[in-house]
Image: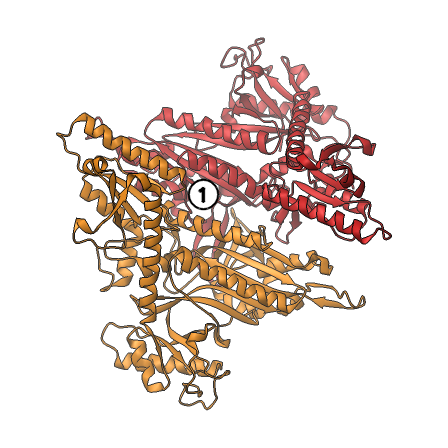
Chain colours: A orange, B red
Amino acid sequence: MTSKASDTPTWYDEVIKKAELIEDYPVKGCFTLRPCAYRMWELIQSWFDGEIKQLGVENAYFPMFIPKVYLEMEAEHLDDFAPELAWVTRCGDRAIDEVALRPSSETAMYASFSKWVQSHRDLPLKINQWCSMIRWEVKQTTPFLRMRENLWQEGHTAYADKESAEKEVLVILDKYAHIYENLLAVPVIRGTKTRAETFAGAEYSTTVEAFIPATGRAIQGATSHHLGQKFSKMFDISFQDPADSTSRQHAWQNSWGITTRTLGVMIMVHGDDRGLVMPPRVASVQVVIVPVGLKATSSQEDKDTLRETAERYLEVLKNEGVRVRLDDGDQRVGWKFSQWEMKGVPLRIELGLKDIQQGTFVMAKRNVVYTRNEDKDIGHDCTMVQDVLWALDDIHADLYAIALCDRDAHIVSIDIWADLTVNLNQGKLLLVPFCGSTECEKTIKEKSKEEAAEGEVEGGLKMGAKSLCVPHEARYQVACSLKCINPECDRQTEEMGQRTLFGRSY
Amino acid sequence: MTSKASDTPTWYDEVIKKAELIEDYPVKGCFTLRPCAYRMWELIQSWFDGEIKQLGVENAYFPMFIPKVYLEMEAEHLDDFAPELAWVTRCGDRAIDEVALRPSSETAMYASFSKWVQSHRDLPLKINQWCSMIRWEVKQTTPFLRMRENLWQEGHTAYADKESAEKEVLVILDKYAHIYENLLAVPVIRGTKTRAETFAGAEYSTTVEAFIPATGRAIQGATSHHLGQKFSKMFDISFQDPADSTSRQHAWQNSWGITTRTLGVMIMVHGDDRGLVMPPRVASVQVVIVPVGLKATSSQEDKDTLRETAERYLEVLKNEGVRVRLDDGDQRVGWKFSQWEMKGVPLRIELGLKDIQQGTFVMAKRNVVYTRNEDKDIGHDCTMVQDVLWALDDIHADLYAIALCDRDAHIVSIDIWADLTVNLNQGKLLLVPFCGSTECEKTIKEKSKEEAAEGEVEGGLKMGAKSLCVPHEARYQVACSLKCINPECDRQTEEMGQRTLFGRSY
């Protein structure tokens, strides 16, 4: 297997196939999500769906076909999508009125919202759908990270007042951060997009940004947008002003989405040269039990004891809701170990006769490289369930801590232009003073791209620096230089000590 | 509102819109599933998904785009779908290699199965996906019943032996029957399709058939197919014979699916002239609490008592997992009652001050027409949860019993041709002796269509009789005439006393 450090793209392609997450498909940019990958997505879905139902969000389903008349209503928004829109033009051998495949459902939904919202009693309106969306990418596609068909949820809400809408934007952003941090064990930076990177239809866009240390590139994890009244004016989503029966007010809207890209980020962050590493809380299989130490010469009694104990552990853990498998196949133990390591199962229980006699079992954590068998954890029969659950929690905590350390070691604060490209070339994330203008952002991107191309070692990325977000957390705002990092710009940062995060990005 | 009996199609269209299940969409044959409808689908999904996971079925996701090369592999199967295939031919303004939108995923999945199955250890392979499928219907479309985009699950399995595969066909058929009978309170007849109605790729197709008394038409509820080795030979899904290492055997396959059509059938069967009637187990809202008897002159204390009791009931029922709403809006009570009746909420709790003082509350069942208030059920504060749960169970049982009675009253056993069309014109289901041949089926259809057109009252259906299934249950097999009902045919039924169910169908 290719090593992650030496050639990350090739390593990634091998891992997702050998771990049986993805299978290539004869339509470019489309991939099959195999059961192990889909199960992880289901677990993310299930958590998030429960959370938004608590917030009063209701699921619905809008058709995947978007008629031209809808797309023409929002020309500006459309410009972003137009080159990647896939069009259905024919049915059987008959030409039909062309329809596009859903790149997202603003237009379809907001036309309905306009009918559903008549009175302030109809607000807030909170609709979500789980579906697939199509972006016919022409650039390079990568499984999970950039595909032509993507599974996602898209939430669309409308409020009577701006304040409530804006509050929700951050509540949802926090749920997205929770998915990365508490389910996938991937640290993210919460922030607001710069003007240049704001979603075309939004007043502002918030984001959680993850980081892939192996490639020194950031990746947008999920976004939560405040749309203001832009769409509600376009689609007439309005209600009678309770204070003035002669006038109507327009609703304040949000939209927010997260995709199966989550899984790609997780694989990139945690995977290693032995294969996939699944974080326990979304792992399709959390524990595998492998009986060990049996020989052809073992007595029937010994074989029975081992089998019965293994089956008891399987049943007890299943009943506790643990996703557990028993591997009692006839392959070699060493082969089994490396297979389950490749598939990224977080915890392996090695169950031998000696252990059973001593009332113990051995636990090997996927995220640890053991040089001596003695380093593995020992569980006790009498506290088996608790031992396993704690081990799973430990694995989550360790994965997160290591990813956080690694990520933080890659963040630098830069005050002058001279320091920018050299750090970019080292795969760093850059906190820089930035005036926020779209022109400066373009300059920074182009200038850093040129410098990167000149200075970089052969085979390195020739990519410039892109803005990722203005981080929300105070610890990223450092009080020093105020002037925009672009040497040609004399403007100051919008707020005192404000830093914008730049870096290479997927 | 149009009455159901006088004009069922118009009534149906009004109900699904007024009950906020469906909204029209500017692409013909496509409809928006509003939250109330989608919630019911989620509840069906959730039950079925749990059941198939218990059977070892794993969910996955295959792309919605089917390349031509796949479709060409199964020409016969394709013929069935070809006129209804929707084709993506353009992206942005560039022509692309044409791809079809998934009408179902046999080809996409079985190409993968061929790679995944190498050894008998890889079997059984049980894959399911929840997705939407496209059939670009050119005939009339109807929300839920016949749409261009349909939500469904498609299960595809492969076994090492025919016997295990065939066993699964019936296990799944029984789960589908359970959805209709135990969740939707709709009786169905389990049976096997005739040769003419068998799915193109199948060795045989089993079905659950429902019946809409209002229109005298049957409707296919869901199908479970045994594919034999047809596809496994076409796609080379094979494994090494454990008994003979030099030869390979082909897998035995099934496929099975159920769609959102379920909801349409339920609406057609239970709905009445006051609107939708949701069966309790899939109702998006099972109970609505409506405070009654308050006047403008009521004391603040009385108002508080009423509000507090209503909120307590809401919380207690919620915690018990009941899908409950409190309607404390400021509209008239009568208006609220008819709104919730229109939406089909199975149980209404009417909570008044007098009731509270007596430690009781009133329960009105949606499926009962009350002529006197005194006929409503009385619940007791001290046994509130149990009273509500029992009432919901009663409603389910009553809905099912009435639907069953109505359905059975429409089944007649016919032995001679002369009785066929007259009964068909009365909206009956016909149990007839039938030789099973495709020619006879065609003759029966055409002949009954002609006769129906001659004999029928003005405005009636001019539709002929179609075969629905050969029922599995013994009670539908009556020992009498053996000769095929087609007067021109001399063949006998395949089995002694076998009857085939014919009728008009959606």
In-image side of B396 versus B44 (left or right)? right
In-image side of B48 versus B243 (left or right)? right
Q: From the image, which quarter does the N terminus of chain A lie in?
A: bottom left
Name the one closer to the observer, B484 or B155: B155
| Residue B118 rendering spot, x and y as whole percentages | 27, 38
User: Residue A76's image quarter?
Assistant: bottom right
In-image side of B372 versus B18 (left or right)? right
Task: Tell me if residue B74 comes above or below residue A416 in the rendering.
Answer: above
Name the one closer to the observer, A129 or B261: A129
The chain to which mark 1 is attached is B
Q: Residue type at mark 1: give it.
A: Gln
User: Residue B2's image quarter?
Assistant: top right
Query: Could you tell me which residue is drawn at 68 percent across and 16 percent down?
Result: B419
Task: Tell me if residue B281 comes above or below residue B67 in the rendering.
Answer: above
| Residue A408 rendering spot, x and y as whole percentages | 34, 70
| Residue A247 rendering spot, x and y as whole percentages | 78, 68
Which residue ends up furthest to the right in the rendered image? B297
Which residue ends up furthest to the top in the rendered image? B480
Task: Tell me if residue B38 comes above or below residue A268 in the rendering.
Answer: above
| Residue A354 rendering spot, x and y as whole percentages | 18, 37
Dot 1: few (<14), some (14–19), or many (≥20) neighbours within 10 Å?
many
- Residue A22, visible in the rendered structure: no
User: Residue A210's image quarter?
Assistant: bottom left
Q: From the image, which quarter does the C terminus of chain A lie in?
A: bottom left
Across the whole image, how many numbered discs are drawn on residues? 1
- Residue A415, visible in the rendered structure: yes
Q: Which residue is mark 1?
A: B129
Name the one closer to the observer, A63 or A175: A175
Q: Secondary structure at mark 1?
A: strand
Task: Tell me if residue B75 comes above or below residue B427 in the rendering.
Answer: below
